Structures are given as structure tokens and as C-alpha cells.
């Protein structure tokens, strides 16, 4: 069935380091792909999305490219900030929304 | 346009009581999803509803849990005879009729069973 697998955490980086969080998906048809972010004590917020192959979603310095050939949607940011510390969820659509298990990111000054 | 509204934000129940969680989707959204999040864990899908219909309840425990999304009013997630293991954050999300658009999340209801 449809599913998402994302990189296990937690991830700890120094400020200004490069970030990659891997995400691969299994889905039938042509799903949309999303990254959501959850700050402590809050609900999930959409970070970025891509609706078709080769689309690149971007927001707040984060990027992810929809790669159909590798069924991946890896999240990247060139220079992380302390304020990026949060839990990041990869998601895809199918019969419902499928979320990965989340990757906790901590950025230290 | 208000976002997804969940209430209450925090709910404390004694073991054996009923917990009733409410979710008002965004205006114009006809799809509602409920998820449970345990501390330090990811989101676990519970149920997907459209107005007056349960589309997928594969993530719902077979006993004590039920959900509805009536023609009028909010979606309700009901947990009967709560136990300590039900303590978690419960999130509701809504989306419009097109499945390939994003889901919008509420702030969640944090249920504590004492």
C-alpha cells in the first residue's frame, strides 16, 4: 500500500550547517508530496509541496525535488538556523494522507 | 478564513470516563482526518471522514473509539472508558475535495488520562 519512509532522527546540527532529511515514498498513481514542520506544542504546518515529477517545492530556504525515478522527496537547506529546530514530516497522498514517522532536528548555536 | 479549530486544547479525564474531541474544518473543506501522536513518536493515522461518511477507519482501535462528521457541525472523535494508554495528542486535519491538495492541521487536543 501507499507509505512514506523518512530518515530516522534525531538530527543535531550546528548553526549554518547543511541539512538533508531523506524521504522515499510508495504510492500508486501520481501522488502529491509534502513536507510538514511541527514546532514544540503546536500542530503541523505545511512547509512545502510538489504535485508532479521534477517539481521543486521551496519555502524559507528549504527545498525538495519530486524524483519519480528514485521515488524520493529529500528535504534540504543550505544553512540551518536555531529557529529551524522542530520535527519534520514527509507526507504523500493516496486514499488518505500518509505521513512518515518524523525527524527531529535540533540546531545548536 | 479561520483555520482548523480543535477544542478543547487540553482535556483531562479520569480512567473510565468519556473523552469527546471536536474538530471544525476550514470553511469549504469536506475531508477530515484524525491522527494520534504519542510523546516522542510520529503521527498515527486513525480515521478519514467525509460529510456523513467514514471513508477509512483502518487506524481506529476496534473498541471504545468512534468518529463522526455530521452534515452540520464539527467532526467528533469519541473515546469511551478512557485508559491511561489513551493519553496523547490528537490532531485533526482537513482538506478540500481534491485529494492532491495539502491538509491543514489544527493545534491538537492533548488528552491526559489520570
Image: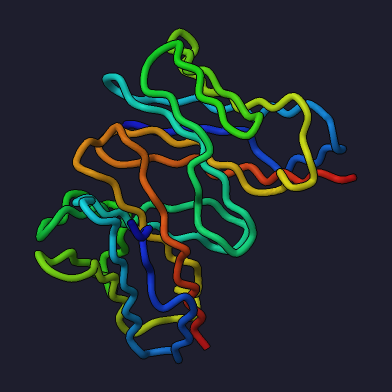
Residue A28 percent coordinates (x, y)? 29, 22
Task: Indicate the quadrant containing the N terminus of chain B: top left, top right, bottom left or bottom right.
Answer: bottom left
* Image-based side of A23 in relation to A91, left or right: right
Q: Is residue B113 above or below residue A95?
A: below
| Residue at image point 32% right, 35% down | B101
Q: Looking at the image, what colour scheme do you see?
A: rainbow
Residue B11 percent coordinates (x, y)? 46, 82
- Hey, which residue is sitting farthest top in the picture? A69
Q: How many marks?
A: 0
* Nearest the eye: B89 or B63: B89
Q: Is residue A23 above or below residue B14?
A: above
| Residue at image point 36% right, 45% down | B103
Q: Is residue A55 above or below residue A14?
A: above
* Nearest the eye: A35 or A69: A35
Q: Is residue A13 above or below residue A87?
A: above
* Nearest the eye: A34 or A58: A58
Residue B20 percent coordinates (x, y)? 31, 79
- Hey, which residue is sitting farthest right in the picture? A109
Rendered image quadrant of residue A26: top left
* Nearest the eye: B55 or B58: B55
| Residue at image point 43% right, 53% down | B44
* Image-based side of A82 in relation to A48, left or right: right
Residue A9 percent coordinates (x, y)? 69, 41
| Residue at image point 87% right, 37% down | A14
Amino acid at each position: 500500500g501507499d507509505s512514506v519512509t523518512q530518515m530516522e532522527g534525531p538530527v543535531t546540527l550546528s548553526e549554518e550547517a547543511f541539512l538533508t532529511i531523506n524521504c522515499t515514498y510508495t504510492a500508486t498513481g501520481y501522488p502529491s508530496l509534502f513536507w510538514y514542520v511541527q514546532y514544540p506544542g503546536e500542530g503541523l504546518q505545511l512547509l512545502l509541496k510538489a504535485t508532479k515529477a521534477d517539481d521543486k517545492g521551496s519555502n524559507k530556504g528549504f527545498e525538495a525535488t519530486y524524483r519519480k525515478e528514485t521515488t524520493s522527496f529529500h528535504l534540504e537547506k543550505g544553512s540551518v538556523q536555531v529557529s529551524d529546530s522542530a520535527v519534520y514530516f514527509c507526507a504523500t497522498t493516496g486514499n488518505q494522507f500518509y505521513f512518515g514517522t518524523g525527524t527531529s532536528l535540533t540546531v545548536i548555536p | 478564513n479561520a483555520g482548523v479549530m480543535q477544542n478543547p486544547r487540553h482535556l483531562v479525564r479520569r480512567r473510565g470516563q468519556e473523552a469527546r474531541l471536536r474538530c471544525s474544518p476550514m470553511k469549504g473543506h469536506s475531508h477530515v482526518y484524525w491522527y494520534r501522536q504519542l510523546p516522542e513518536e510520529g503521527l498515527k493515522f486513525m480515521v478519514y471522514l467525509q460529510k456523513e461518511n467514514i471513508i477509512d477507519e483502518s487506524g481506529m482501535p476496534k473498541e471504545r473509539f468512534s468518529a463522526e462528521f455530521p452534515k452540520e457541525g464539527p467532526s467528533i472523535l469519541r473515546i469511551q472508558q478512557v485508559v491511561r494508554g489513551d493519553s496523547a495528542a490528537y490532531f485533526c486535519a482537513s482538506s478540500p475535495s481534491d485529494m492532491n491538495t495539502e491538509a491543514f492541521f489544527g493545534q491538537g487536543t492533548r488528552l491526559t488520562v489520570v
